[in-house]
Image: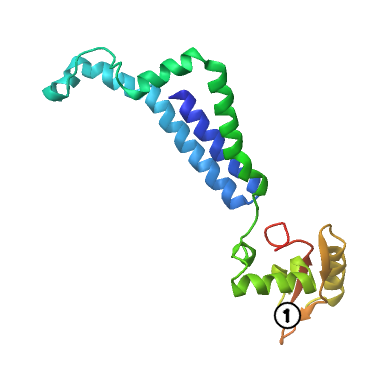
Amino acid sequence: MLFAGTTVIIAVLGLFVVGLALIRGLAIGVSVGVLTTMLASVTLLPAMFGFAGRNIDRLGLAHRRRAEGTDRRSVWYRWSRVVQARPWPAAIAAALLLLVLALPVFGIRLGFGDAGNRPTSDSARRACDLVAEGFGAGANGPLVLVADSPDGGPVDREALGRLAQAADAAPDVAGVSPPIPNERGDGALLIVQPETSPQGSCC
């Protein structure tokens, strides 16, 4: 129980590699739930069985009772004998199988999904490829920065200009548009184009 629960917790905490706060919170919540269930299974459940004693067998079905012993004719019994007779070939074969099953991890794409996940025959995928080819991969997932005036008056154009320069100088940023004010002049937005697609790799 402890080994299985710990394995699940480690696997769920692997969601931290995605780098999103929402996913991190989900991973922590699931891990705490698994940890609580695991602790209850090794403390509360044995205590309840201890109070019940042999009375727990009163509801057992008679035809489900089988004689003690091992069925030497079963496939799993024969397979266990083969593994015990040659443990190293079995261990090497199992390790190779696990490595093959783990190969897709090298092609994992983190971040937000985009049209680059669609098949190449899809029109949305072809449009994504054309936009990435003509304007850069980041054009498929621009970041929109919105600024408003705290007192309801006109926005500070100089401050927005400095913000645009700072955003343009940030790493992995291909370019930043000039501040675009709204009709009332109390708000503006900046469009930041990253160098990579929303998934962190080109479509």
Q: Is residue 76 visible?
A: yes
Residue at point 53% right, 22% down? 90
User: Whole-percent x and y of residue 164?
Assistant: 84, 69
Q: Nearer the viewer, residue 62 or 51?
A: 62
Front in this rendered view, residue 84 or 113? 84
Up the image or down, 60 lies above or below 128; here it is above
Q: Position of residue 59 (x, y in %)?
A: 14, 25
Quick check: can you spot residue 147? Answer: no
- Position of the N terminus, as image quadrant, is top left
Q: How many marks?
A: 1
Q: Looking at the picture, does residue 125 appear above or below residue 196?
A: below
Q: Is residue 27 left or right of residue 184?
A: left
Q: Secondary structure at mark 1?
A: loop
**Can you tell which quarter of the image residue 14 is in?**
top right
In this figure, which residue is indicated by the disc labeled 1?
Answer: 186
The answer to whether 55 appears left or right of 74 in the picture is left
Between residue 101 and residue 195, name the one nearer to us. 101
Dot 1 crowding, Cα within 10 Å, few <14, some 14–19, many 20+: some
Residue at the far left in the pictured view: 62
Q: Quadrant of residue 57?
A: top left
The residue closer to the viewer here, 33 or 124, is 124
Figure check: 178 above or below 138: below
> Disc 1 marks which amino acid?
Asp
The residue drawn where x is 54% and y is 43% is 27
Quadrant for the C terminus, please.
Answer: bottom right
Q: Quadrant of residue 173?
A: bottom right
Residue 174 in the image: x percent, y percent?
83, 66
- Residue at horizontal 46%, vertical 28%? 4
